[in-house]
Amino acid sequence: MEGVGVNATSRLTGVGKQAILRLLADLGTACFRFHEERVRGLKPARIECDEVWSFVWAKEKSLRPEHRGTRGIGDAWLWTAIDPDTKLLVSFHVGKRSPDDARAFTLDLASRLTNVTTLSTDGLGFYPDAVYEAFGDSVNYGQVVKVFTQEPPTDARYTPPKCVGCKKSAVLGGPRARDISTSIIERSNLTIRSQNRRFSRLTLGHSKKLANHEYSIALFWTYYNWVRPHASLAGKTPAQAAGLTDRRWTLEDLIGLTR
């Protein structure tokens, strides 16, 4: 849970790699079930959504023609949703960056909420139809579209263009401009990359199997919400701030989910 890969964990603990992977599978499965059952009935005032890129086995652009379209390899986008007030990671979905995945993600998100909320996303074109299908008219939805400079490419690898501004627009309902934001979810994306080796760029730490990738995400999700104290919450966990528990979990509590 500190951004250390499986091989490094094996060297540090003296435990075989296969044993670590078996524990990851058992605990990841338990964490997914726990999240499905317990993170429900939420009443957040706001929700922010975003997507985090990663890949399994090989990058999409590097796949051979016969491998393209094969499930479990290539780009693996993590769709995420967060309550910016409690910092609770509400929903996640692993898939492609497609209309079907946008729909699956927003439907899951809607199933966890019990009130009309303000929802913010980036300018991805798949969101408006997916949000309307999941929420109907019972949501105040807005998008944040970043404006980038059109600078000539440089020799630096993965150098993003410079952001020079943002445009906010209301899509559904009547969201207030000040409530349309993706700042918190973008900061949480940095935490995901920092504490999950499989999301590190330019390394060999990427996932080789989709199942292990999903186990790792489910484990991180539960650890972040229930065990890891958040600096902005005076030492509380997001689950405490959201009223889902009255105490901070220990690692023993987390591992106990496998019983």
Image: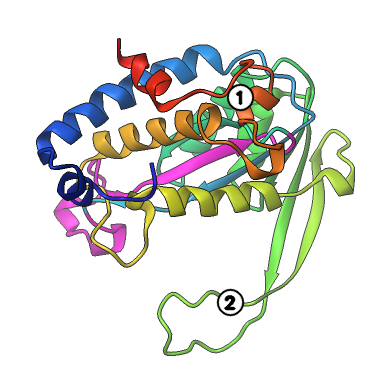
Report the residue at 66% width, 32% height from top.
Answer: 131
Q: Quadrant of the N terminus?
A: top left
Residue 188 rendering spot, x and y as whole percentages: 58, 47
Q: Quadrant of the C terminus?
A: top left
Residue 73 rendering spot, x and y as whole percentages: 24, 46
Report the residue at 86% width, 39% height from top.
Answer: 175
The residue carrying mark 2 is 161
The residue carrying mark 1 is 239
Which residue is more in the foreground, 62 or 238?
238
User: SS for tag 2?
Assistant: loop
Q: Is residue 169 visible?
A: yes
Q: Residues within 10 Å of mark 2 (few under 14, many from 20)?
A: few
Residue 202 rendering spot, x and y as whole percentages: 32, 67
Does residue 225 sit above or below 30 in this rendering? below
Q: Amino acid at mark 1?
A: Ala
Does residue 75 sit above or below 216 in this rendering? below
Q: Is residue 169 left or right of residue 37?
A: right
Mark 1 and 2 residues: CB-CB less than 8 Å, in contact?
A: no
Q: Residues within 10 Å of mark 1 (few under 14, many from 20)?
A: many
Stretch in magenta: 58-85
Q: Is residue 100 visible?
A: no
Q: Is residue 83 magenta?
A: yes
Which residue is more in the foreground, 246 or 64?
246
Q: Give the distance between the C-alpha atoms of the residues marked 1 and 2, in whole angstroms.
A: 36 Å
Which residue is more in the foreground, 185 or 26?
26
Report the residue at 27% width, 53% height from top.
Answer: 206
Camera-near label (1 vs 2) is 1
Residue 34 rendering spot, x and y as whole percentages: 44, 16
Q: Count the marks: how many?
A: 2
